[in-house]
Image (spheres, helix red, strand yellow):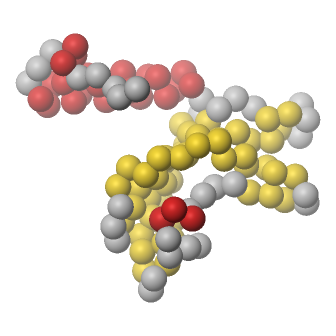
Amino acid sequence: MSGNIEELGIAYEEDGIEVIRELDRAVLSKGAWATLIFRYRQWEPAKEAYGEDKYSIRRYRKMKGEYRVQSKFTISGPEQALRLIDVLREWTAEAAGKGEEAIQCRP
């Protein structure tokens, strides 16, 4: 692990093969507890290719100067991600007491 939030990642190599290829990341919150979301692809040996985009939300806790994963959730693909976005948009609009059209995702 790392003591610097900017160095956290999910790329993983095994036997010379990049099994998890990190494509992008965003820091959702910083501090003693940090939340990051990663966009990645996983190597599929049977196809000898990377699969579709997946997304992982990870919660880190800083202890003794280093961030350690405390929990993680994988969004299995674009369809599940879009469904999650729809539900969150609906809930946040309700919480704000406004119609769905009032809340838009940032580009």
x then y, percent, for residue 38: 55, 46
> In the image shown, does 20 or 104 lie closer to the viewer?
104
Residue ID at (14%, 31%):
95
Dividing the picture into quarters, in which one does residue 46 lie?
top right
Which quadrant holds the C terminus?
top left
The residue sitting at 46% across, 23% down in the picture is 82
Viewer-closest of 29 and 77 = 29
Q: Quadrant of residue 89?
A: top left
Q: Relative to 96, does residue 15 appear above or below in the rendering?
A: below
Give the residue drawn at x 74%, y 57%: 12
| For residue 67, above or below residue 57 | below
Image coordinates of residue 101 in percent, x first then y, are 22, 13
Instruction: Please indicate, yes or no, whether residue 73 appears anywhere in the rendered image.
Output: no
Furthest residue in direction left, as rendered: 97
Numbered disc total: 0
Q: Horizontally, is 51 left or right of 86 in the view?
A: right
In the image, residue 87 lies at what x, y percent? 33, 25
Answer yes or no: is residue 49 visible.
yes
* x and y, in percent, of residue 77 in the image: 60, 29
Q: Residue at x 36, y 21 (%)?
A: 86
Outermost residue to the bottom: 64
Instruction: Report whether 103 appears left or right of 95.
Output: right
Residue 47 as seen in the image, left or right of residue 6: right
| Vertical comparison of 72 with 96: above or below | below
Q: Quadrant of the N terminus?
A: bottom right
